[in-house]
Image: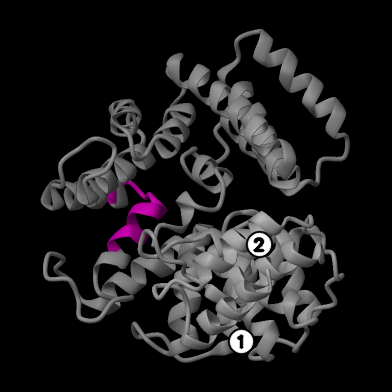
Amino acid sequence: MIHILRTGVLLLLTAAMPAGAGAQGERAQIGCCVWAGTARDMPALVQVTEQAVEAGDTSAMVNRALQFENTATFDAAQGARWRGEALALYRRAAGRGDVLGEIAMGVRTLDTPEGAKWFARALRQGSARGMAFYGYVLFHGRGGLAPDRERGIACYKAARDKGDAAAARFLSDLSGVYKAPAQPWIEGDALAETALLRGAAGAGDAGSMVNLGWLHERGEGGMAESIAEAARLYRAAAEAGNAVGLTNLAALHVTGRGVPRDEKTAAALYARAAALGDERAQAALAALWLAGRGGLAGTDAAALAALQATAARESPPGACEAGWAVVALARFHRDGARGAPRDAAAARRLAERASNRRCGSVETRAEARALLERL
């Protein structure tokens, strides 16, 4: 799993910078403030950043894009607009040769031929992070490239040797530390790869913290089983805005493993991860809401959005992944309940979908058919 691709751009960008390198270091600090929402004077910061953008400062363009993406996280209604503004600024910075802009563009165009080209441009400027992600698209055959595992691994190793945390984590993911059996195209001892992972986590890579926490939670990869250590690592990743860290920490709070049992805290963590697009968090938040747990209001907008996202997922295409969510949403539309508008046509469409033999359990399909008969 490449957590760094799914949980926002801040970690990706700041990890690509040399620490404390003058203006680059200042840029990382500004980005951290914006992303975490801790800037003391946000309007003044935005004004200064916009002035620098107008002056053609590519560092400011990247920071303003971060601000737009942060806004999109909390303003779902206008999310597409803010993400579009961010993409335009990343593209503008990348077009002027800004390495962080190039990497950000590569991530956002990962499944198009444009993706590999941006990573290649960053690589040619000597960026270890650009090299790591170029290895990723080579290995997996994305970004318009044909799969080439040998060259992909070579890029991973070169980037790792230059100190890139993401490359170390990519290699650990492939080594069999998280998969059984080990993949045959990676040589090396699992304990050695786990050591790389520990180094990446120690360097502040949130995705590595999550993976290391996962190993501690299960006592695998040479790590001692320790729920407390797993919780600590998940919390550190969550504080960095990592959606998987937020979700894993929430799950511990639901059960009380390694942390106090607290469903309100779990619901809040799930809501943050759900807003970042984590599918497990969306399903878990919706389930807590439907069960009347977690202290969630009956018309909680975030929970309704999570239920809608869960109901919309198809796996495989044409089948619904969570029949229970589809049936619940159909019922809400029928009754105009829980913040969903009364819409008999939408209720029927959802119930018909949930009655499909490829949707959910036998019980769920029976419930959907019964609902259809009453519509």
Q: Decide which of 189, 62 is in the foreground and name it.
A: 62
Work out which quarter of the rendered image holds the N terminus and state it.
Answer: bottom left
Main SS, magenta residues: helix
Residue range corresponding to the magenta coloring: 161-171
Query: Considering the numbered disc 1 on the image, is that residue within a helix, a strand or a loop?
Result: helix
Which kind of residue does numbered mark 2 sit on? Ala
Q: List the residue tagged with mark 2.
A: 347
Q: Decide which of 375, 220 is in the foreground and name it.
A: 375
Work out which quarter of the rendered image holds the C terminus and state it.
Answer: bottom right
Instruction: List x then y, in percent, for residue 299.
Output: 84, 64
Query: Considering the numbered disc 2 on the image, is that residue within a helix, a strand or a loop?
Result: helix
Instruction: List x then y, in percent, for residue 233.
Output: 57, 73
Q: Is residue 154 visible?
A: yes
Q: Decide which of 189, 296 is in the foreground and name it.
A: 296
Q: List the residue tagged with mark 1.
A: 228
Q: Is residue 46 above or below residue 226?
A: above
